[in-house]
Structure formats: C-alpha cells, structure tokens
C-alpha cells in the first residue's frame, strides 16, 4: 500500500494520505457534530472532546493501513536502509519469470518439420557391374545430404527425397531413366549420368525440358557444351591437364608422354594435354593408345619411353586399367614419374600393383580423410559430410581410419548443396529462377561438403577452378600398407 513510506523514525503521514482519507474524516465529523434546529452544524469546543477526536482519528488510520482490511504493504528494496550483512531481496507478491544467467546455454530453436508433396532428386548411375561401386558411393553421399536438408526443415518447407535408378552401364537405359525422371517422377533436379558418353546421350532431353542437371563424376568437356541447365561439380579434363602440367613443370620434368585409353575421354586427354604441357614450358613427346580389353600394356609403355619421356601421364579414370600401366612401367625398370587422375586413387591399387605403387601421384579434389589429415585441419563442411556419410560420431585418428569402406562421393553432395542453396534463394523450383541463382554460386571451402571453394557463373558452369585441386602421392607405410598423402595444392 502506498499510503505510507518507511523512515528511520517509523511511519509518517504523506500529503496524499490526507487527501485520500478526507471523506472518512468528514464522516467522523458528522458523527461527532451537533445539528441545530436551523440545520447548522455546531462543533464541540471542549478541549477534551478535541483530544478524543484526534485519538480516534489516529487509531482509525493505523487500523486501515496495518490491520485486517488487506495485506500488509511491503516496502521496496531501494527504500529500505541497507543492512550490514547481505542486501535485502525484494519479495514479489506474484510469480515472475526470472532472467536466464548470461552463461546459460541458449535454448535450441524448434525446427518445423517439412510437410507436403516431396521434392524429388533423381540419381542415375550404374549400381551393378564393374562400376557399380560408383553409383553406391554417389547414393551414400546424396542420401546424407538429403537427410541434412530434411533435418533442417526441408526445402521450401517440403521434404526432399532421393530417387535412384541403376542404368546398368547401358546408354539406352540411361536415356529411358532420365525420361522417366522428367515425365513421370517430375524430379526437380537430376544427378548423373556418371560417364561422359551417357551424359551426351541425355543432353538434348535434359535441355529441352529445362531440367536442372549436375554431373559429379563426368569430366569430359563436351558434356557442358550447349547444355544451359547442366552444371559440373567435378574437375574437368581441361583443369586436370592444366594442373598436371603445372605440377610436372615445377617438379623438374622436361618431356611428357602419355599412355591413354582409346575412348571419348581419352580423345579429350590427347586434345588438351599437349597445349597444357607447352604452356608449362615442357615438351610433349607423344602418346600411345590402349583398348579396354588389353591385358598387357608393356608395348605401349616401351614406345613412350623410346620417345624420351621423363614423365608419364596415365590417361584413364579406371583403376584396373591404370594398374596395367603402372605394372608395365615398373616391369621394364622404368623409374619414371607416373601421374594421373582418379584412376590412380583407388585403395585397391596396393593389392593390384604392390610396391610399384610407391611414389605414384594423382590429382583430385580434397581427400583429407583418406590422406590422414587430422580432424582439426579439415574444413567444417567436409568434416560434417564425412561423419554423416560414414556414420561416424567422431573422426578417427589418421592411423585408425578404415579406408576399405570409404563409401562417399563428395562431388555428389556438392551438387545437392549448391542446388538446395539456389532453391532457397530463388524461393521457387522454377528451373529458370533456380538456374539464375546457381549461376551466382560462391561457396567457401569451409562450408562445402567437398572442402573446395565452389564458384559457378553464367559464363562458366564448372564448380572447380584453377588452383582448387590437390596432388597426392602414394607411400608404403611401415606396416606394409599403402596410403596416399597430400603433396601440394
């Protein structure tokens, strides 16, 4: 009650109290007055009567403020004198929400669950046959990225689902699957096909229907030509050849030769490597072709050595074929620098070629987990994806990592990441709107699933640019196993 305030001497009457209780005083006066026959009020003049009236007034005021008419008023903390011990705490008359301490953990925000019609992503790749492991790895990485998106509320508030199809390494079946994705499944984005020739077979179908397409395992240059809705999240053959030439030039090589698979991709190696070697200040001495069913490549390797090469490029992305080149070079005693692309990455090479694998070099995107890079040195986005794809709670120490079951394709996760971010910015699934946003992509290496800096523009649909690749060299460990380590970027 605000009619009194504390003081050191006790309670004292405030000015506003006299006004507030004035009607009560008047009532008491009327009870104590003498009314004349003329209706005039006659006040008692006796001194005793006045003392009694004042005493009655004081008692009434004390009773009304401290008696049983209502709760006792509590003084505020600031108005009370500070005690010598602990400061007095105010006692609120009603429950109030107490503020959280500054070091309390922040409350986890509630994420709305995605709902409505699913948004579909189509994945076409071989899931069976000699390249079946490629499709399986792509699916593992794609599914991990889809689960991340859904856990964060989906896309445009809707769930995302992955629809995977096995093309059985049959280009006719690849076309059939892509058509099914577009016409029946109504997918919003297609990942694949996985080989350059198959991508070329589906290019017109994808372009005519304005379907967003990402190629995470196709390096052929023709795949992106006249394909306005197609993007690549793998290093192109042009980039591979440029980076290999730069590496060889800086390592002291002067004459470069190549043993290359006779297919469409090999034809692009042949078209692009000579100019890259020349630009790096070296001489390209020539190449030798081999077929897919050739078992012994000694003849081809001998011919390139006779041309005077001091560096040999292994022109295939197939590990079994690459192994044949390595074996042939070492069997003839040619201790030449062997360098190539993804065909030299497989952990199975140690079993295929044995000690001949030591010192072999290949170029690729970031491979921190396989190369034994400590967890603290891995980019955050890459580490997050590795844990999700491999179902790990923590990243094992380098010498405790099982590389025999590294089922992932970070370039596939990059494709979904780029596309999803573009859809969010566009606020729609409209192909032209999403395409325009993809062409503004600039994702730093710490955020991307691959650990690479991803840049896409309207003029260049390649996510990887010069200087973004890494070189790895195979080394035999003390325990007899092989592991590749990062050489340079």
Image (tube, grey):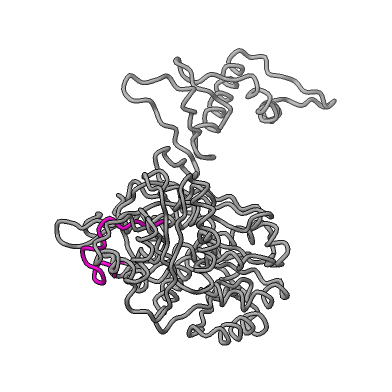
Give residue 250's position: percent from left, percent from top: 40, 43
**293 or 478, which lies in front?**
293
Q: Which residue appears farthest toward the right when viewing the image?
A: 38
Task: Give the magenta part as a residue range.
Answer: 347-363
Q: Which residue appears farthest toward the left when viewing the image?
A: 479
Count of marks placed on residues:
0
Give residue 334's position: percent from left, percent from top: 27, 60
Is residue 353 magenta-colored? yes
Q: Where is residue 420, by image quadrant?
A: bottom right
User: In the image, 290: left or right of 178?
Assistant: left
Q: Residue at x 42, y 51 (%)?
A: 380
Q: Which residue appears farthest toward the front when viewing the image?
A: 306
Q: Where is 204 relative to 306, above or below?
A: below
Is residue 140 magenta-colored? no
Q: Where is 379 relative to 435, above or below?
A: above
**440 or 5, which lies in front?**
440
User: In the image, 204: left or right of 37?
Assistant: left
Give residue 29's position: percent from left, percent from top: 69, 26
Q: Residue at x 42, y 84 (%)?
A: 128
**86 or 51, which lies in front?**
86
Give residue 423's position: percent from left, percent from top: 64, 61
Query: From the image, which quarter does the N terminus lie in?
Result: top right
User: In the image, 234: left or right of 371?
Assistant: right
**463 or 304, which lies in front?**
304
Q: Where is residue 221, by image quadrant?
A: bottom right
Q: Where is 486 relative to 60, above or below?
A: below
Q: Where is residue 406, by image quadrant?
A: bottom left
């Amino acid at each position: 009650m605000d009619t009194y305030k504390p003081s050191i001497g006790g309670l004292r009457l405030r000015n506003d109290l006299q006004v507030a209780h004035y009607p009560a005083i008047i009532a008491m006066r009327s009870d104590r007055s003498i009314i004349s026959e003329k209706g005039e009020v006659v006040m008692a003049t006796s001194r005793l009567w006045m003392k009694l009236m004042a005493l009655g007034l004081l008692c009434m005021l004390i009773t009304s403020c401290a008696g049983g008419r209502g709760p006792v008023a509590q003084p505020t903390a600031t108005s009370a004198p500070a005690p010598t011990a602990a400061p007095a705490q105010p006692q609120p008359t009603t429950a109030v929400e107490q503020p959280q301490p500054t070091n309390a953990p922040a409350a986890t925000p509630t994420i709305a669950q995605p709902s409505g019609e699913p948004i579909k992503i189509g994945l076409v790749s071989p899931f069976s046959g000699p390249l079946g492991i490629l499709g399986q790895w792509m699916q593992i990485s794609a599914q991990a990225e889809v689960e991340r998106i859904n856990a964060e509320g989906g896309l445009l508030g809707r769930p995302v689902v992955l629809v995977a199809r096995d093309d059985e390494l049959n280009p006719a079946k690849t076309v059939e699957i892509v058509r099914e994705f577009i016409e029946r499944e109504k997918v919003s984005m297609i990942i694949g096909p996985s080989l350059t020739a198959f991508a070329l077979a589906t290019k017109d179908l994808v372009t005519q229907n304005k379907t967003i397409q990402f190629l995470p395992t196709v390096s052929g240059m023709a795949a992106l030509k006249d394909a306005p809705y197609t993007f690549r999240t793998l290093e192109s053959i042009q980039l591979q050849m440029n980076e290999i030439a730069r590496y060889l030039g800086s390592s002291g090589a002067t004459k470069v030769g190549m043993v290359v698979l006779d297919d469409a991709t090999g034809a692009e190696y042949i078209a692009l490597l000579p100019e890259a070697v020349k630009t790096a200040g070296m001489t390209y001495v020539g190449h030798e072709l081999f077929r897919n069913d050739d078992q012994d490549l000694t003849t081809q390797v001998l011919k390139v050595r006779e041309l005077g090469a001091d560096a040999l490029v292994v022109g295939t992305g197939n590990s079994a074929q690459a192994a044949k080149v390595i074996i042939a070079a070492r069997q003839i005693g040619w201790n030449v620098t062997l360098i190539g692309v993804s065909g030299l990455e497989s952990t199975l090479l140690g079993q295929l070629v044995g000690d001949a694998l030591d010192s072999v070099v290949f170029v690729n995107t970031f491979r921190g987990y396989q190369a034994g890079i400590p967890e603290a040195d891995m980019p955050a986005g890459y580490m997050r994806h590795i844990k999700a794809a491999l179902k790990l709670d923590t990243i094992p120490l380098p010498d405790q990592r099982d590389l025999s079951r590294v089922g992932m394709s970070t370039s596939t996760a990059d494709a979904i990441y780029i596309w999803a971010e573009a859809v969010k910015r566009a606020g729609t699934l409209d192909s032209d709107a999403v395409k325009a946003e993809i062409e503004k992509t600039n994702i730093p290496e710490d955020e991307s699933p691959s650990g690479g800096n991803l840049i896409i523009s309207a003029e260049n649909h390649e996510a990887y640019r010069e200087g973004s690749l890494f070189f790895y060299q195979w080394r035999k460990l003390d325990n007899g196993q092989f592991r590749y380590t990062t050489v340079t970027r």
